[in-house]
Every structure is written in C-alpha cells, then in structure tokens.
Amino acid sequence: MTTSSFEAPFVLRWWIGCRVLFTTFIVVMQTLMNNPRNPQIREICDRQLKNWSRRVVRLIRAEVDITDCDKFTFEKGKRYIFMSNHASHFDIPFVYYALNGTIRMIAKKELGDIPLFGRAGRKSEFIFIDRNNRNQAKKDLAAARKLMESGVAIWMAPEGTRSRTGELLPFKKGGFHLAMQTDAIIVPFAIVGAQRLLPADSTRLRLNESIEVKMGVPIDSTDYTASERNQLAQDVYQQIDALLSNKPIKAGSSKSISPESD
C-alpha cells in the first residue's frame, strides 16, 4: 500500500536537499574523471546518469509509474528527439530514470555556467543553449545536430522554462527547426505530477508522491514540409497535453505556438 504524500518539515527537507546535492556532486566528479579517449565513454556516462537518477528518486521517496517507455525501441540509423513538459527541478532525474539508451539533454545556458556542473555536462555531451543570443543559439543547435548524427538521442523541454502551474506552456520553435533539419523522429512524453514535488519558485518539498512518466506516439518529422513546422509543433503539443490530462491522443491542437521570428 502506498504511503500518503506529505510536505517535508524543514530539517528533513534540508537533509534531503544536501543528500541530493552530494549525490549530484559525486556523479559530476565521476564524469570529470572519465577518460574522454575511452571508446566506451558514452556507455559509461549512460550508466552514471541512470544510477544518479535512481539515487535521487529514492531520496525523494517518489513512486514512479512508467507507461509505455519500456516498450520503445530505437531503430538503427534513425535520429530521435524526446520532448516533454517541464514543471519541476526533478524532471531531469525522472527522465533518466524512465528512459533507456544514450540520451543527452538540451538545457539553458545558465545551467552550463554552474561551476563543475557545466564542465561535466559538456564532457558528457549535454548541449547548453544561449536563448538570448540568436547567433550563438544557432551554433548550439548545430552542435546538437552533429551529436544526433553520431547516434545520440536528444531530450528537451520545448516550453523553454518550467511551468509555474503545471499546465503546458506554449512551445518555442528551436527544437522543431532541429527536428526538421535532421529528419528526426520526435517522441512526445509527459511527466505527470512532478510539479507537486517541488513547485517552481518554492522550497517546499513533498515526499511519497506518485509520478507517472507516459510516452505518446512517435512523430516522424519527415512527414511534414518546411511550411508545416507549426503543425508539427501543434501535434506534439496536443499529444503531451493529452497525456497530462489523461485524454485520448488525437490529431490537431487548439493551443498556439509562442510567436517567434524565424
């Protein structure tokens, strides 16, 4: 029987926070000590990320239900971009807990500026996007394209920031540019309930929460023309929104993509 969730008191919250930071520090140092010339460096990073995610999930006492993620298989020679909602700092460990394979994250530049963490992220082939510098962002996405062509799948949150309410925000367009430039298959999935754990702009932490990671139906970007990029984004949005709302997945969406110039 699942124990009821509860808000952690300050002392317990502080202790868990320290343990999560320590666990993250350990994997950061392990990554920095990896030999980049080792032909199995990616597999080593995969294992380190998976082990880190499992430790973090245990520390926050989350019960994670994985729906359809374990049924997904990669096709040789195909490129993949996983896209999900983003409502909690704990989304990252949930992603690596639920998904298998060589998957690297596209994240905002500010995370890459964190001492040690940024170095470890780059060494493990994470891509940090400078959203305030259009030219640099294009270079960052080009690096992501090169990474995908070498056999790495990408995970990104097309909202571009954490939702303060848990509701899906309008999507940015960069990920859909990348998908169409690389003929990638987009795999929509939803992390349900993570916003209850640690709400955005809050230090309140809830333990024993039930989280569900649900995978949608992969969408082949080659089925869309360049002029249909917005429709591609709409279809991905609709799937993630339906997964969050526990509704059937259907074509089309009433939500709009955030207006950005090309």
Image: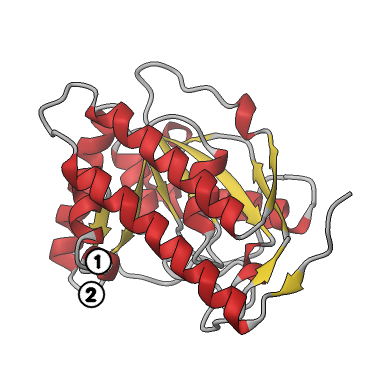
- Residue type indicated by callout 2: Asn
The x, y position of residue 214, in whole percent, is 67, 44
The x, y position of residue 6, in whole percent, is 76, 72
The residue that appears at 57% across and 57% down in the rendered structure is: 59
Q: Is residue 172 left or right of residue 126?
A: right
- Which residue bears the numbered disc 2? 132
The residue that appears at 45% across and 39% down in the rendered structure is: 50
Report helix, strand or loop for mark 2: loop
- Which residue bears the numbered disc 1? 109
The x, y position of residue 164, in whole percent, is 57, 78
Residue 221 in the image: above or below residue 260: above
**Depth-wise, is mark 2 or mark 1 nearer the camera?**
1
The residue that appears at 42% across and 66% down in the rendered structure is: 160
Q: Is residue 162 visible?
A: no
Give 18 or 245, whichever is nearer the viewer.
18
Q: Is residue 163 left or right of residue 225?
A: right
Q: Is residue 73 left or right of residue 174?
A: right
Say whether marks 2 and 1 touch (CB < 8 Å).
yes
The residue that appears at 14% across and 63% down in the rendered structure is: 136
Residue 249 in the image: above or below residue 85: above
